[in-house]
Image (cartoon, rainbow, N blue to C red):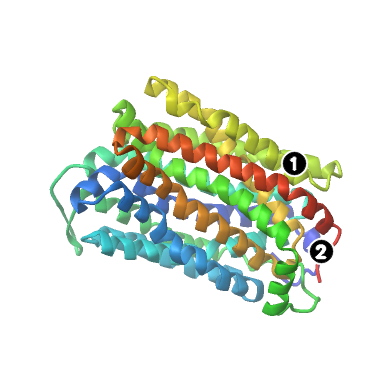
Amino acid sequence: MNEQNPNPETQNLKQAWFVVGILTLAYVSSFIDRQILSLLVKPIKRDLNISDTQISLLMGLSFALFYTFLGIPIARLADTQNRKKIIAWGIGLWSVMTALCGITKNFNQLFLARMGVGIGESALSPSAYSMIADLFPKNKLAAANSVYNMGIFIGSGMAFLLGGLVVKSVTTQGVWHLPIVGDVFPWQAVFFAVGLPGLLIVFIISLFKEPVRKSVGQRKVSLSETFKFLLKEWRVYLTLNLGMAFVTMVNYATAAWVPTFFDRTYGWGAGKAGIIFGAVVMVFSTIGLWFGGKLADYYTQKGEVLGRIKACILLITGFFATCWIFPIMPTGEAAAIALVPVAFFSSSMFGAGTAAILEVTPSQMRGMASALYLFFANLIGLTFGPLMVAILTDKVFHDEKAIRFSLLFVMLGGLILSLLFMVLSQKPYLKMDKKSGDL
């Protein structure tokens, strides 16, 4: 890309999509690293002697602590510094920390390593969303964000697929001896396999230049001005972010516990469950994201100011209408089929939701607005999604096989709250849209 071009609206779309492709690859890598844990529940519980609740903390809280809170200062850097370099450093860190998970010896060490993964991954999305908003015109922004968000579901699907293929060999008892590293549990070798290849993406990032900011030629905005603007428009940001956060909570809950649900309910084993769940997620969640982005852009092109929110409400309603079916199916095969519409709708609103937030945010503040979105999504989604399922199973039902009911209650409750906040966002968004643009 030519950094001297002052008009990003006329940039070559092929180059813009190339950048989105690389950012999506990075997002895929990040989700493989964070989701692989959900297929290793049984051997980790056995070898580290921990409970469902502790496993949920490794899946959620350990990662979310720094991933959530560091997103804010990193977003400020994304609004003022070279975003490509921020992303490259982040990828390098999370890849190394994922590999370090493979040499941990107890719960506390694994918890700390997962915190390191969260620190690295906090660098990606605020910078990526800011880049994408600078690369595409408004009428293509939801589609571009949808492609980037495909990384969530392609990465998760690949984690389940790859994990499913190797899980039988790494869930055996005993230890393996690896060169340099020494003795490790078999499941720990998986972290080396999924972590270290991420370092190659650091090199791939060098293949494009830092995109031109749409705010070029306009005055810089101070941190205090940014917070003042966000606080002034708190009704829009609070309702939209909570609406997206609760649907994210549902997605993290299902991603964390669906393979275990198939194992405990139908006796499938983590390998079979991972392969089938991974295939469903990769295919149908990707299609859902594409469809949701296109639907939101269609409404926007028709001139509907609330088009993106309208799309979110329709898609979340579809998620709510289908999510309750798979947990109550009598057979694993029926449950797997019932997961198809769940996978489709679970991803479909993310392109529209992120585009709605970016559309009404001045370009000088989009990194911070993205971080605010990620703060809510991950504080609520990552922390409470896996944890609430585990607490219901451990503390309410006192039965591992009751995980189907734990999933059901978390999904229905989360989606009701998501719909409520999306509906509440419409009025303040309509007022704010007239004031959107650069400062």
Residue closest to the eye, 405 or 183 = 405
Which residue is depicted at the point 24% across and 51% down? 50
The image quadrant that residue 405 belongs to is top left
Query: Image quarter for residue 361?
Result: bottom right
Please give left or right for residue 101 compared with residue 222 in the image: left
Q: Which residue is mark 2?
A: 437
Q: Earlier in the sequence, mark 1 or mark 2?
A: 1
Question: Where 45 falls versus 131 (above or below)?
Answer: above
Q: Quadrant of the N terminus?
A: bottom right
Q: Quadrant of residue 82?
A: bottom right
**Residue 288 against residue 80 in the figure, above or below:** above
User: Type of residue at label 1?
Assistant: Lys
* Nearer to us in this view, 382 or 233: 233
- Rendered location of residue 79, percent (x, y): 66, 72
Tell whether 211 sits left or right of 41.
right
The residue that appears at 26% across and 43% down in the rendered structure is 42
Dot 2: element = loop
Determine whether, in the image, residue 391 is placed left or right of residue 25. Answer: left
Would you place residue 84 above or below residue 332 in this image? below
Which x, y percent locates residue 290? Answer: 64, 40
Question: Residue 228: horizontal and vertical position, in percent?
Answer: 72, 73
State the image coordinates of residue 387 (x, y, percent, origin top left). 40, 50
Q: Is residue 29 visible?
A: no
Between residue 350 and residue 225, name the one nearer to us: 225
* Label number found at residue 348: none
Q: Residue at x 62, y 76 (%)?
A: 81
Instruction: Name the residue type under label 2.
Output: Gly
Q: Quick one: quadrant of the C terminus?
A: bottom right
Instruction: Give the Cα separation between the discs numbered 1 and 2.
Output: 21 Å
On the image, numbered disc 1 is attached to which residue? Answer: 310
**Left or right of 283 on screen, residue 200:** left
Q: Tell me which residue sits at (56%, 48%) in the image.
A: 246
